[in-house]
Image (cartoon, rainbow, N blue to C red):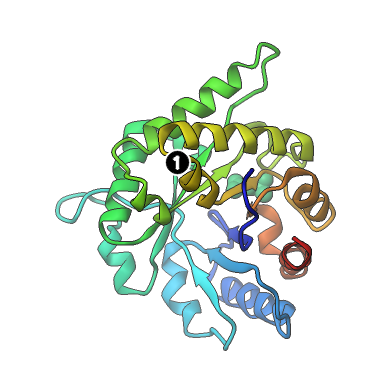
Amino acid sequence: MSKRHKPLVVGNWKMNPATLARAEKIWVDVQKALSGRRGLTEVAIAPPLPFISEIMQLSGPQKIDFVAQDVSYEEGGAFTGEVSVAMLRSIGVKCAIVGHSERRARGENDLDVNKKVQALIASKSAAIVCVGEKERDRSGDYFNQVEEQISKALSGVTPAEMKHVVLAYEPVWAIGTGQSAEGSDVQEMKLFIYKILADLYDRETAEKTRVLYGGSVNADNAASLLEAGTSDGFLVGGASLEAKQFAAIVKAADHYAKFA
Ligand code: PGA
């Protein structure tokens, strides 16, 4: 079955904090809290766009990547409010989250997600594609929902292009609720996603694709989710705004990578 990957932990700041000064403070604190680690985990943060260039200037020697929380699939032109893949690349951002449930709740559909994935891949940027059911019904229909979201998001994406794709399983009921999924639920979904990818592509591609978990991850549950859930890392919302919590989650992933 699937090999373990280098874990990836991404902090999604969402529409927080309210000011640049506060964002700078969080960023400085995050770097301080992570300093001195020699972990294998890849770390990235997704701050609000207006802050990215500014806080990049305050980056120290640690390798922490910047990710956009969303991106347009349009190349440019009369699209008020939108930001293109090329604009992101021009400030050094080569990855975007797409299909987050908070964007889907505001109207983003599977076709939009697919076009965004295609636009990112076309520029050799990476896509973190979020999928996840709104609720868990007893009949297990949530598996079908996740399968549909994945197959539509990846429509037209070739096996070779899958190296630009990371999947994030984020059950909507677990996001921002303080009620994370159980490790066993994450493991079950991870196996299911592996099977979807093996069917859509092949086993090798399925094995190579990282599947993150997101939904109320914090310093207390990160280690057990990694062990029980065999997830390849996390998409962290609320806890990523607190430097110590975020660092503890990264270190849990480092520890897991060491013993994997
Ligand atoms: P949460 O958010 O960690 O605050 O639940 C996760 C996410 O939305 O990616």
Where in the figure is residue 25, as x and y percent of width and height? 63, 77
Relative to 56, residue 244 above or below: above
Relative to 249, residue 154 above or below: above
Residue 221 can be seen in this image: yes
Near-viewer residue (217 or 15): 217
Q: Is residue 192 left or right of residue 111?
A: right
Near-viewer residue (197 or 221): 197
Q: Quadrant of residue 220?
A: bottom right
Where in the figure is residue 75, as x and y percent of width and height? 19, 55
Relative to 147, residue 116 above or below: below
What residue appears at the point 39 percent right and 68 percent down from the top-left corner? 93
Does dot 1 land on a helix, a strand or a loop?
loop
Residue extending farthest to the top is: 139
Residue under numbered circle 1:
99
Residue extending farthest to the left is: 77
Relative to 80, residue 26 above or below: below
What residue appears at the point 81 percent right and 55 percent down from the top-left corner? 223
Q: Is residue 205 left or right of residue 33?
A: left
Q: Is residue 223 left or right of residue 23?
A: right
